[in-house]
Image (tube, rainbow, N blue to C red):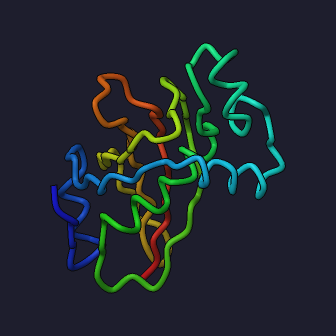
Amino acid sequence: MPIITINNLIDLQARVGEELAVSDWLEITQQRIAQFAEATGDHQWIHVDVARAARESPFGGAIAHGYLTLSLLAKFAQESIVIGNIRMGVNYGLNRVRFTAPVRAGNSIRARFVLTAYDAIEGGAQLTWKASVEIKDSEKPACIAEMILRWYL
């Protein structure tokens, strides 16, 4: 699915219930995992000790932090959903997040976005999205989240 371009924020009201965007694939490298560990201070061995993770982890190797996978939703959304005449957008929060499968170093992931609610707010709209992060060649998603974004005109 290509990048979706919506001319005006109000045009999204009629699209509630639709899958509107699918991002491009992104490879999760061990370097990205290590950088996330540095940024957050989460150096748990299942993420950063490749040799130990290969030996001892039930996942068969190093895996990405769940919060790394979750944090990439902002990147995926910005790259796959373009709305005209928006002054700014902010993350408003999450209602529900589940990490349903590990993302191993070397896996590629992408996100699918379904618009589940559109609520007018002063100066713009609050949009609720069901976001699913898929792992290439896997039937089970890595993460499912209900994310809330506020976009202002």
Q: How far across and down, in percent of the image, does residue 83 sit?
A: 30, 75
- Picture residue at 22% right of the left edge, 66% below the top: 3
Q: Is residue 139 left or right of residue 30?
A: left
* In-front residue for pair 106/144: 106
Q: Splitting the image into 4 quarters, where does residue 24 fall? A: bottom left
Reply above or below: 150 against 65. below
Residue 76 against residue 145 in the figure, above or below = below
Q: Residue 54 location, x and y as percent?
A: 62, 23
Residue for point 38% across, 44% down: 108
Which quarter of the figure has residue 20? bottom left
Residue at (57% x, 52% y) in the render: 71
Which quadrant holds the C terminus?
bottom left
| 51 in relation to 148, above or below | above
Horizontal arrangement in the rendering, residue 33 relative to residue 25 (left or right) = right
Q: Residue 111 in the image: state x and y as whole percent.
A: 36, 47
Q: Position of residue 110 (x, y in %)?
A: 35, 47
Horizontal arrangement in the rendering, residue 21 relative to residue 132 (left or right)? left
Where the N terminus falls, by quadrant? bottom left
Number of marks present in the image shown: 0
Say which of 112 and 62 sits in front: 62
- On screen, 86 above or below 132? below
The residue at the point 58 percent across, 58 percent down is: 92
